[in-house]
């Protein structure tokens, strides 16, 4: 967490914090705008301006000139800047083998970091399931000094630890409530809403959502989207959530529960691409026809979807567009220690298939 100025001698304390940021390299080059600095420091405009004027008089900052932002005096930059300028960016993921699509989405970041002489390191420390990973994260940060961090599908304790430490961090995912890290994520709620509207128009009123067991922000957004789409139907539709543990047997178990209900679902919405193969094989083994007896839509995608028959109705991301947004924010984190660009949720494109049909008659 950013060290905030104390409320005594507020101008001096604000100046002290700014000097500390310069000494540690968190501020270098041009300063962020006044609005962003006010938010980071938690002070008013007059206090900030008086502190900036004080630092300019003491030659910590160059004066603003012809509308250009103030910048840090070169001689005030920390002595270790040259030694640390080639620190890598570390990509933290729960998966020891990075998915092809993820690598494609990170490619522009890797190339642009390489132009600076920096590497993009992928690590999977095996701490994602820990309820209290703080000690492990402290050691991880010491063992892997980094110019910035990218968190891939991080748990809530991990997100909060990076947020509280104030480390330059980008979320490759949606943030948990109360986490204020910048993020680039897919708009799962919009995709789920679009899918739900299509199912509702085909008469589906009981929709099963297959999800990973952890209550992640993206999955909650997906549920909201489906519920919003089904609520206006007459009679109103409802979403029934079933959980798996990222393994085929647990997906099959969820399907057993779903189709063992008295009012079994007439449509399935999948949150992860690997669920599709298990669903197709399980439904075929029970003689349940798609889409005659159950409709199916996947909010995720993979290249091998093109080999599936019947072709699945699904939603896909634009990896290059996402990659550009990630690269812009990572490079800003490396240069300035913070991201001024707004966080963004990117739309997913609908790919029509042959797996959505009318709800079967009761």
Image: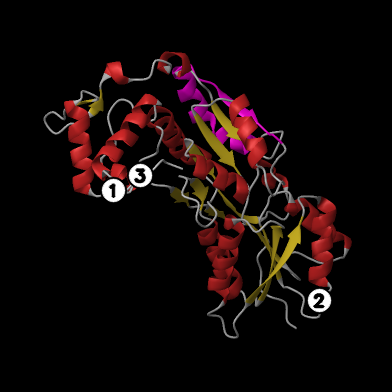
Residue located beneath label 1 in the image: 43
How many marks overall?
Answer: 3
Q: How far from the left and from the top, in percent, is residue 212?
A: 71, 56
Tell me the magenta residue range: 99-125
The answer for how far apart the CA atoms under marks 3 and 2 are is 52 Å
The answer for how far apart the CA atoms under marks 1 and 2 are is 57 Å
- Please give the name of the residue rendered at 54% of the width and 36% of the height, measured from the top-left corner: 150
* Residue 93 seen anywhere in this rendered image of the structure: no
Q: Residue furthest left?
A: 66
The answer for how far apart the CA atoms under marks 3 and 1 are is 8 Å
Neighbour tally class for label 1: few under 14, some 14-19, many 20 plus, Cα within 10 Å = some
Neighbour tally class for label 2: few under 14, some 14-19, many 20 plus, Cα within 10 Å = few
Q: Is residue 142 above or below residue 17?
A: above
Residue located beneath label 3 in the image: 40
- Please give the name of the residue rendered at 16% of the width and 30% of the height, measured from the top-left corner: 64
Q: How far from the left and from the top, in percent, is residue 10?
A: 27, 44
Question: Which badge, 1 or 2, is on the more N-terminal residue?
Answer: 1
Q: Quadrant of residue 298?
A: bottom right
Question: Which badge, 3 or 2, is on the more N-terminal residue?
Answer: 3
Residue located beneath label 2 in the image: 261
- Please give the name of the residue rendered at 73% of the width and 53% of the height, measured from the top-left corner: 276
Q: Nearer the viewer, mark 1 or mark 2?
A: 1
Helix, strand or loop for disc 1: loop
The one of 79 and 275 positioned closer to us in this rendering = 79
Q: Is residue 224 above or below residue 324?
A: below
């Amino acid at each position: 967490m950013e060290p905030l100025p104390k409320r005594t001698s507020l101008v001096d304390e604000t100046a002290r914090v700014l000097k500390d940021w310069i000494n540690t390299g968190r501020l270098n080059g041009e300063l962020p705008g006044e609005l962003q600095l006010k938010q980071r420091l938690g002070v008013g405009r007059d206090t900030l301006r008086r502190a900036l004027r004080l630092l300019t008089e003491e030659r910590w900052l160059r004066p603003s000139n012809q509308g250009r932002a103030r910048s840090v005096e070169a001689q005030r930059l920390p002595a270790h800047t040259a030694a640390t300028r080639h620190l890598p960016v570390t990509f933290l993921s729960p998966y020891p083998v990075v998915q092809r699509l993820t690598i494609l989405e990170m490619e522009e970041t890797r190339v642009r970091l390489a132009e600076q002489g920096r590497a993009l390191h992928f690590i999977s420390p095996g701490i994602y399931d820990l309820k209290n990973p703080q000690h492990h994260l402290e050691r991880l940060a010491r063992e892997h000094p980094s110019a910035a961090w990218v968190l891939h599908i991080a748990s809530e304790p991990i997100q909060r630890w990076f947020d509280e430490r104030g480390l330059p961090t980008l979320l490759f995912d949606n943030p948990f409530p109360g986490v204020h890290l910048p993020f680039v994520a897919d708009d799962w709620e919009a995709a789920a809403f679009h899918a739900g509207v299509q199912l509702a128009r085909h008469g589906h009123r009981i929709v099963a959502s297959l999800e990973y067991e952890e209550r992640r922000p993206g999955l909650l957004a997906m549920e909201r989207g489906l519920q919003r789409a089904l609520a206006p139907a007459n009679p109103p539709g409802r979403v029934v959530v079933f959980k798996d543990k990222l393994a085929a047997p647990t997906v099959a178990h969820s399907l057993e529960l779903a189709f063992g209900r008295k009012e079994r679902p007439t449509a399935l919405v999948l949150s992860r691409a690997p669920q599709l193969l298990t669903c197709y094989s399980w439904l075929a083994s029970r003689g349940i026809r798609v889409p005659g007896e159950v409709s199916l839509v996947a909010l995720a995608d993979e290249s091998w979807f093109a080999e599936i028959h019947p072709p699945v109705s699904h939603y896909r991301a634009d990896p290059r567009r996402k990659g550009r947004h990630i690269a812009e924010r990572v490079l800003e984190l490396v240069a300035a220690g913070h991201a001024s660009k707004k966080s963004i949720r990117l739309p997913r494109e609908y790919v029509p298939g042959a797996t959505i049909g009318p709800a079967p008659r009761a």
